[in-house]
């Protein structure tokens, strides 16, 4: 049946042990079946697809569902391997590790046709984006994901008008790949479409320790205090605690708040040993909240370390999210932040404010940013602000290495920036 309320797999969550997980950089697939929510068949479009069908699709990706959070305009699936966001007209699938993201395409469209009773194929989609950073361990990947050219060849078999980009210094370990395709008829769609990513490596060990847990996997991680109380598990409980303690739940507070100046205090719990490398709250938002940006959160703390979270908000008929993924292991520590929040002139927080807050939480040695921005006058300001952020970021000790802009196929602009901790 279609999920009508939040869902948590407490058994999977309690028994999960991620000791051997290692590949942090994610594969990001975003498929727009239709331009706008109102264009999707039926009242809820893709959101009416039953949980069991999404599980079948995700099985082909080697992903498991930990929990599901519902809001008015977008449903957030927290996965063992990161996140799935389902809107009426599109989906966003972001996975890490050795997942096989592109292996699900046939079944994805089969499910869409069957559940929405519509005749749609991959050749008909409005637009598609697929992107990833250079993998840390490409030889460990599976399916077509060992090589970007193979990924592009497969995508071109499914989608029309495909175009591939390699962004950044190709000789470095920070360059970024992007594929765009689809019919893209009638762009821009006017849906305030932006995607902002921060990809961080060489995390400060003192900050990374906040994403290490000491509980043991097994039935003791499932907690029930009484027969009248809802069952919960320590992985989700500790995930939400970590989100509060680190300040990750506050990155979108209005810029006038004290948090904008950065009050993050890293954990001082002792004793502490950083792992060495080895080979929600209620999501229902009332109508009275339409004038507020109140994100509801779902988070999970992995064993022995690692963290993922989804946060969603409904406003003015649109669904917005931000998601984080942290692998703090020594030698290949990595953290990512992604959001589709609309950084407009009227928004209560600016894109550089959010960037600075995230950097103050993780203190990475290196980071890259990408902003894919719909070409619309109201969205041009944040593009300019982020492109000019070098002085603000320099105050945190970072030096700009690269800035690249692309006029992308269709009605989008791309901004790529790369920074390193200054040695001077």
Image (cartoon, rainbow, N blue to C red):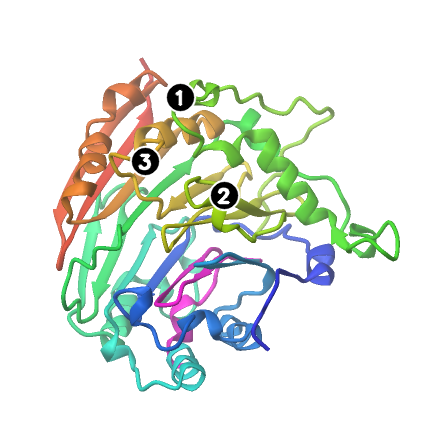
Residue 228: percent from the left, percent from the top? 85, 56
Quick check: marks 2 and 3 in contact, CB under 8 Å? no
Q: As drawn, is 123 to the left or to the right of 242? A: left
* Residue at the disc numbered 3: 347
Quick check: marks 2 and 1 in contact, CB under 8 Å? no
Real-space Cα distance between discs 2 and 3? Answer: 14 Å
- The structure residue drawn at horizontal position 47% and vertical position 18%, both measured from the top left corner, is 258
Examine the structure image and report whether residue 82 is included in the region drawn in magenta.
yes
Q: Is residue 303 visible?
A: no
- The structure residue drawn at horizontal position 42% and vertical position 42%, both measured from the top left corner, is 337
Q: Is residue 227 above or below residue 162?
A: above
Q: As drawn, is 173 to the left or to the right of 240? A: left
* Residue at the disc numbered 1: 256
Other-residue count near label 2 (Cα within 10 Å), few / some / many at <14 / 14–19 / ≥20: many
* Residue at the disc numbered 2: 295
- The structure residue drawn at horizontal position 27% and vertical position 71%, both measured from the top left corner, is 155
Real-space Cα distance between discs 2 and 1? Answer: 18 Å
Residue 356: percent from the left, percent from the top? 38, 26
Count of numbered labels shown in the rendering: 3
The quadrant of the rendering that contains the N terminus is: bottom right
The residue segment tinted magenta is 80-106
């Amino acid at each position: 049946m279609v999920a009508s309320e939040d869902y948590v797999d407490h058994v999977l969550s309690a028994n999960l042990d991620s000791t051997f997980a290692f590949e942090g950089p994610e594969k990001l697939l975003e498929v727009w079946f239709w331009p706008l929510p109102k264009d999707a068949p039926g009242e809820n479009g893709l959101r009416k697809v039953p949980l069991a069908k999404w599980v079948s699709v995700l099985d082909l990706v080697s992903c498991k569902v930990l929990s599901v959070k519902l809001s008015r305009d977008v449903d957030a699936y927290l996965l063992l391997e990161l996140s799935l966001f389902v809107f009426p007209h599109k989906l966003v699938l972001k996975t890490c590790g050795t997942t096989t993201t592109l292996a699900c395409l046939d079944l994805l469209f089969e499910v869409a046709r069957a559940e929405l009773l519509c005749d749609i194929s991959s050749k008909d989609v409005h637009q598609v984006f697929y992107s990833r950073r250079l993998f840390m361990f490409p030889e460990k990947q599976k399916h077509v994901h060992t090589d970007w050219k193979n990924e592009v060849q497969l995508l071109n078999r499914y989608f029309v008008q495909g175009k591939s980009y390699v962004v950044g210094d190709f000789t470095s370990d920070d360059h970024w790949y992007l594929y765009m395709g689809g019919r893209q008829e009638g762009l821009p769609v006017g849906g305030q479409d932006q995607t902002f990513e921060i990809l961080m490596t060489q995390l400060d060990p003192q900050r990374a320790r906040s994403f290490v847990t000491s509980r043991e996997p097994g039935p003791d991680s499932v907690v029930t205090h009484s027969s009248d109380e809802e069952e919960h598990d320590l992985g989700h409980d500790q995930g939400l605690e970590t989100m509060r303690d680190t300040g990750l739940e506050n990155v979108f507070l209005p810029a006038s708040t004290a948090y904008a100046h950065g009050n993050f205090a890293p954990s001082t719990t002792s004793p502490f040993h950083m792992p060495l490398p080895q080979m929600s709250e209620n999501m229902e938002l009332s109508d009275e909240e339409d004038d507020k940006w109140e994100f509801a959160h779902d988070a999970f703390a992995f064993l022995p370390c690692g963290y993922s979270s989804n946060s969603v908000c409904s406003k003015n008929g649109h669904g917005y999210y931000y998601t984080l993924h942290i692998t703090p292991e020594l030698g290949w520590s990595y953290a990512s932040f992604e959001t589709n929040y609309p950084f407009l002139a009227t928004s209560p927080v600016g894109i550089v404010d959010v960037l600075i807050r995230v950097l103050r939480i993780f203190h990475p040695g290196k980071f890259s940013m990408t902003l894919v921005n719909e070409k619309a006058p109201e969205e041009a300001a944040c593009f300019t602000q982020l492109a000019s952020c070098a002085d603000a970021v320099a105050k945190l000790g970072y030096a700009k290495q690269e800035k690249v802009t692309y006029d992308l196929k269709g009605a989008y602009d791309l901004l790529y920036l790369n920074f390193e901790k200054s040695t001077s």
